[in-house]
Image (cartoon, rainbow, N blue to C red):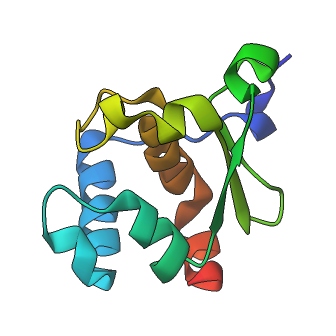
Amino acid sequence: MLNEDSCPPFMEDDEIKAKVEQFRSRFARCTRFPVDIESLVEIDLKIDIQPEKGLKSYGNTDAFISSDFRTMHVDEYEYMDERYINRQGTCDCRFRINSILIGMGEDRITRSA
């Protein structure tokens, strides 16, 4: 059961856009499209990406981040599948990585970078 503590705060579109621009301004690789998400996560944010076999089929999720925000576990099949390379927005796993980054919040990104 979800309570207020486990739900992310509601943000207006303008607030989201401002946070995205603030984040993008801190990392040069975010100024080129498509953004190399894997390099951003592993090099800039120093978060290890750990493919896990069967994560989506057994865990019903394609990615999650560890409680210390140092390791991102991703479904190996989706992460390694060549069909999803450079196809922005079509890979659930890479979308989940973006969602996790947004959910980390500015204070956690600052500490891990």
Quarter of the image that includes the N terminus? top right
Instruction: Kindly tell me whether residue 10 is visible in this rendering.
Output: no
Residue 69 locus on image (x, y percent):
73, 64
Give the vertical position of 94 relative to 25 (above or below): above
Quadrant of res 113? bottom right
Quadrant of res 37? bottom left
Residue occupying the point 49% across, 80% down: 43
Query: Which residue appears farthest toward the left when viewing the image?
Result: 32
Report the number of discs. Answer: 0
Residue 78 locus on image (x, y percent):
52, 30
Give the vertical position of 46 relative to 95 (above or below): below
Give the vertical position of 34 relative to 88 (above or below): below
The answer to whether 14 appears left or right of 77 in the picture is: left
Residue occupying the point 13% across, 68% down: 32
Residue 92 locus on image (x, y percent):
45, 28
Quadrant of res 75? top right
Residue 96 locus on image (x, y percent):
51, 38
Residue occupying the point 56% across, 48% down: 100
Give the vertical position of 2 relative to 71 (above or below): above
Instruction: Kindly tell me whether residue 13 is visible in this rendering.
Output: yes
Depth order, front residue of 5/77: 77
Depth order, front residue of 80/91: 80
Residue occupying the point 56% across, 61% down: 105
The answer to whether 74 appears left or right of 106 in the picture is: right
